[in-house]
Image (cartoon, coloured by chain):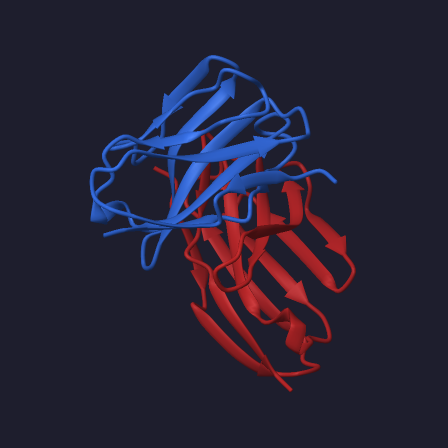
Chain colours: A blue, B red
Amino acid sequence: EAQVTQNPRYLITVTGKKLTVTCSQNMNHEYMSWYRQDPGLGLRQIYYSMNVEVTDKGDVPEGYKVSRKEKRNFPLILESPSPNQTSLYFCASSRRTGLYGYTFGSGTRLTVV
Amino acid sequence: KQEVTQIPAALSVPEGENLVLNCSFTDSAIYNLQWFRQDPGKGLTSLLLIQSSQREQTSGRLNASLDKSSGRSTLYIAASQPGDSATYLCAVEGQKLVFGQGTRLTINP
């Protein structure tokens, strides 16, 4: 089944403890991105990647890092999480931007206390 | 800067009704528009993708239209069912993918 898989689905952590949210797609998509969803603010893009080793900032990149060493994986790294990063996070992928639409993962609900 | 607006923010209708959800965007220089469904606390499920050269797309009871020149799209749901209750999001892809805030739809049995 073609899908975007995120792990974990739920995570509660403490301020300052480094964490990684994994994202993997099995569709050989070139483009991958991360979003956060907050009440009243909607979905906002954090980082995106046009292909392997090519990443760029989205609208709200502060406090996050990403890497794209393999085409299928695009992990989101929070080196020192803070409570304002409590949110619902989504990973998405697309075969090619502008043509094929996007497939989203099931989401990761992160709580930072 | 692209802005996407969805009206209404919430809608409650009895089962069986046909309904229309609206999406408007400010910049007509887009590649496509995609409608998603989101159940509470869950991921986004793609419903329909309309390329900028297309006027509409249909899938089952769903029909989405696109008028790029006026910056508008509608999602028509025929014969609504309680299982259609969810938040519906439209997303416009230009330089990047921009989402509306969504319409929370409730279908009452």
Q: Image quarter for residue A55?
A: top left
Q: In this view, does B8 lie above or below A57?
A: below
In depth, the one of B73 and A28 nearer the eye is A28
In depth, the one of B76 and A26 nearer the eye is A26
In depth, the one of B47 and A86 nearer the eye is A86
Q: Residue at x 49, y 49 (%)?
A: A9
Q: Where is residue B3 in the image (x, y as percent from the top left)?
A: 38, 46
Q: Image quarter for residue A89?
A: top left
Q: In this view, does B21 lie to the left or right of A111?
A: right
Q: Position of residue A73 (x, y in %)?
A: 54, 26
Q: Is residue A28 left or right of residue A52?
A: right
User: Which corner quadrant holds the N terminus of chain B?
Assistant: top left
Q: In this view, does A56 lie above or below A41?
A: above
Asked if residue A92 shows in the view, the reply is: yes
Q: Position of residue A72 (x, y in %)?
A: 59, 24
Asked if residue B70 shows in the view, the reply is: no
Q: Image quarter for residue A46?
A: top left
Q: Residue at x 50, y 56 (%)?
A: B23
Q: Which residue is drawn at 52% across and 14% down?
A: A52
Q: Is residue A76 left or right of residue A100?
A: left
Figure label count: 0
Q: Which residue is drawn at 57% across and 27% down?
A: A97
Residue farthest to the top, as pictured: A53
User: Which corner quadrant holds the C terminus of chain B?
Assistant: bottom right
In depth, the one of B103 and A51 nearer the eye is A51
